[in-house]
Structures are given as structure tokens and as C-alpha cells.
Image (cartoon, rainbow, N blue to C red):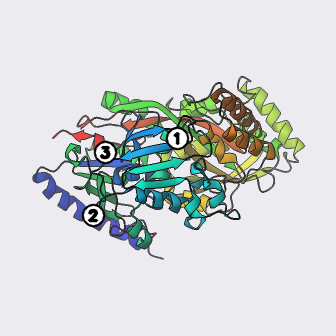
Amino acid sequence: MLDVTRRRAPLAFAALLATLRGAAANGAAIFHRGNDGDPETLDPHRTSTVAEAHLLRDLREGLVINNMKGEVVPGVAESWTTSDDGRLWRFGLRSDAKWSNGEPLRASDFVHSFRRIINPETGAKYANLLFPIRNAEAIHKAATGSALEDLGVRAPDDRTLEIELERPTPYLLELLTHQSALPVHPASAAKASLAPTSTGSWITNGAYSLSEFVPNSHIRLDRNPHFHDASQVKIDTVIFYPAPDLAAAAQRFLAGELQLTTDIPADQVKELRRKLGDQVQIGPYLATYFLILNTSKQPFDDPRVRRALSLQIDRDFIADAIWGGTMLPAYGVIPPHIGNYGERAEMDFRYESVLEREDEARQLLGAAGFGSGMPLDIEFRFNTTDNNRRTAAAIAEQWRAIGVETRFVETDYRAHFAYLRSGGDFDVARYGWIGDYSDPQNFLFLFQSDNPGFNIGKYANPRFDALMKLAADELDIAKRAAILREADSIVTTEQPWIPVLHYSTKNLVSPRLSGFEQNLRGVVPTRFLSLAA
């Protein structure tokens, strides 16, 4: 079948360039930035990818936001207080908060939005992030007697929002910066198309409004004149380009077609540093690069097989030779620099030699019934980027040494994650998790058996689930950290997901771009940037 979208994209891009040339001639500041891929959706309550988060930070504003340092600062809420027991938060909303159609944004809009994401009919992947809110879990799981109206979010008046919690939640403000807590305009949300390319459906409240979306080409956002801080927004138009081909994105940057990229081809880091100097920026990131194993099927339900596959991966080689030293080898689920935690759990073989690991891996596969006469055949799915392709090839070559035969299924960013989220069958799949907030729970919740939206490998361990529940109920921060550390040890030992690398943020940044700062969260809201002529 002819892919009409791809055929249209070059024509749309040519028309875009003609329009932008005219706008630039009139003095408009136009920012061209790369993105990890096309969004599957721009509905904040159905979204789940980093590419979508980059767009939503420009299109919408929550109660609180992250600034360019990654710090939590006021958004729609200009102030907040909390009760002595930490269970009731009261937010005072700014009087000049408006939707992009000019209507005032009211506290009741947030009530509607929180109810919408918790409503099981919405199908929100991230709903369980909001389970700290009173009755959220019971409502989302359709417990007997639960009702949306019982959700612990209230609007005593148009400018006051109250959030009642099941228990004190130390990371609540960071949690509220996440796209799951973004507001939707009640009337337009009821009518909006689920198609992400629809530009007329959504009324938003952020610094920018959606003007155009051509898949595989670009997404154009224009400054929202009704935004409360519009006078301080320096960039008039921002164009996001899906850029999974990192080498091509680097070339576009060198040609001056992009002023910012979200990643760098690892094999070109040294050369790019030579050419560009401090325009190449690399920093720490709350993120882990995983291989998810489908523990619901044989032989990946066997912990011996999972450990053997993990043992045989030479993470130091991959970090240095494949990623050019821009990533850290990962021997645990949780990345460095995480908040509300102590010492992270790590694999017991971290300091063993490569030969010692390979010997144990062979023995484990043999004990599981695999060997020279019975090779382990694996289908390995990953989304297309140069770095992912080279990483997959290196891992497959390392696995070959212990009798593993690997077949690749390579798809684009959007198709890969849509396939996994829809419950498609797989053996091994590449996955990356970027911290939504700086707390170990945000990585460990991925493995809870009652989290089908993100527990893609269908891992289930009753002891782990019990510990996560116990940690959620623990009020003492140090005791909570100790409980989470025990849960961390379980998944680090059983390895339903194999951690391979800890990410760093990797950007090409034009000298024309001012205000940019790398941060642990990897957030880059356009509203805080400016462009020199």
C-alpha cells in the first residue's frame, strides 16, 4: 500500500519553509529543534513517550513546572501550602491563567482533568502515578463503591485547588510537573480526535499552540497570545522535527537547519567535538537503557536464562566503543543521582571478569536446556536509531559466543512503542526509562504486576509487590528508602528487564540559542529560550 503520508511530507515541508522565510523576514524568532520521533498522541492523559513530553511542555502548563535547571517552580499555581500531616495540599491559581481560546482557566478544570486521567475508561498508561491521591487507585481499578466524585481533588472556588492524599508523598511537587497532571479543556477534550495530527481539536494553556502537524516531517507550534507570561516568551514559532536518524540530524545541525538536537550519534562524538567544541553538550540524566524480557513465555520465564543473557553483555565495551563514552554501564535498575534514596542495588557480578561471566552464562544456559545442539533463538526488537542499531548488533555478537542466535525486528520510534504498549508478542525489546521525578519509586513501579501500562514484560513477584505497597504506606523517609532498596534488590537479581546503560543527556546546541541548560530531567521548555539573529 502506498504510504501517502510520506509522499505528502516533502511537499508540506517545502510549503513550511516558504511560510517561515516570510515570517523571519518580518522579524519573527523561529526555533528549529529535533525530537526523538513523532508522537503517537498529544492527549496528555494518553501519552507515555519522551518525544510527546517535549511537545506537551510547550503546549500545556500544569500546577507546577520544571524550569531550565530542572527545578520545580510555579506554573498555573502561584502558591501552595500543605497541612501539618502532609496529606492535604492547597494550591492558589494565578488570576491571569487562560486557555488558548481566551477563556479563563478555573480550578474546576483541574478537577475535571484529574478525574479524566483516573477514569479507567480513558485508558491512561500513567494513571497509577497519581495513586497517591485519595481514592485514585480504587477508582481506577473500579473497586466496588468507588466513584469519580470521590477522588481527592476539589475546587472550593475558581482559584483554589485542593489535593488530598492517601499518605504523605515526598515527591508530590515533582510528580505534578509530569504530563499526567496537565489540564485539559473540558469541552474540547470531550470532542477531540484521538488522531495526533488534529490541530483544531485541542484547546491548550501553555506558551504555544499547535498550528500544524505533518507526520514524518514537522510539528509547528506558535506563541499563544493568551498565555499568562506571553510577554516573556521570546521565540515566536518552534518547529519540532522527528529525528531518529541521528547522523542526519547532526548534518542538519552542521548545515544550520537545526538549533538543538535531543541526541548525538555516538560514533561521531569525537569528530563533532573537534568541529563544534562546546556546542556538543553531555551531562547526567535520570534514565536507564533496558532490554525487556517477556517473562510470560518460555524460556524467558526462567531466571537462569535471564541471568545468562545479562552476564554475557559487556556493558563497559558498549558504553565506550559503541556510545563513545557518553553513557555509563548499568548494573542496576536505578540511575545515579536519584533522590530520596541511599545506595542503589547492583548486580553481584559487576566486578567479575568477562571470562568469568561467560563461563557462568554457558553453565546457566546448559542447565536450562540450551547448548551447541540446542541454540537459544531470540527475536530482538528495537526502534530505529544509529545508536540502537549498533548496540543491538554488539549485544547479538556477544550473545553468539554462548550459543544464542538473534534475529532483529527494527521499526520506527512510534511503531515500536505502540507495539509494546498494545501488548504485542516479543522475546526481547529495547526500552528506555526517563525518570518522571527524582525518586526510586518511579523506576521500581515499572515492575509491579498491577501496572499493565508499563510492565511490558509481564513480570510478577508477590514479594516485590508487597514491598512496593509497604513503601507506599511508610511515612518515614529513611525506612521507606530501606524498603525500596529491598524491592530494588529483587528486580536487580531476577532481571526481568536487563539494565544495559545509564543515559546521559546529549545535545548539539547552536551558539545562537540562549538560556539552554542541561539538567537531570532532560527538560527543555522553549518558553525559557531565546534566539540571536
The mark lying in front, picked from 3 and 2, is 2
Q: Which residue is mark 3?
A: 526
Residue for point 27% across, 64% down: 101
User: Quick one: SS at disc 3?
Assistant: helix
Q: Are marks 2 and 1 in contact (CB under 8 Å)?
A: no
Three-letter amino acid code at the position of disc 2: Asn
Q: Is residue 365 visible?
A: yes
Q: Is residue 119 visible?
A: no
User: Quick one: SS at disc 2?
Assistant: loop
Image quadrant where one finds the C terminus: top left
Residue for point 48% across, 55% down: 154
Can you give x and y, in whole percent of width and height, for residue 302 in the image? 82, 47
The mark lying in front, picked from 1 and 3, is 1
Q: Which residues are magenta?
A: 193-199
Q: Which residue is mark 2?
A: 101
Q: How many marks on residues?
A: 3
The residue furthest bottom is 1
Circle nearer the N terminus (1, 3): 1
Circle nearer the N terminus (3, 2): 2
Can you give x and y, in whole percent of width and height, for residue 220 in the image? 30, 58
Separation of disc 1 and disc 3 at Cα? Answer: 24 Å
Magenta stretch encompasses residue 238: no
Q: Nearer the viewer, residue 133 or 8?
A: 133
What is the quadrant of residue 71 in the picture? top left
Left or right, residue 20 beside residue 81? left
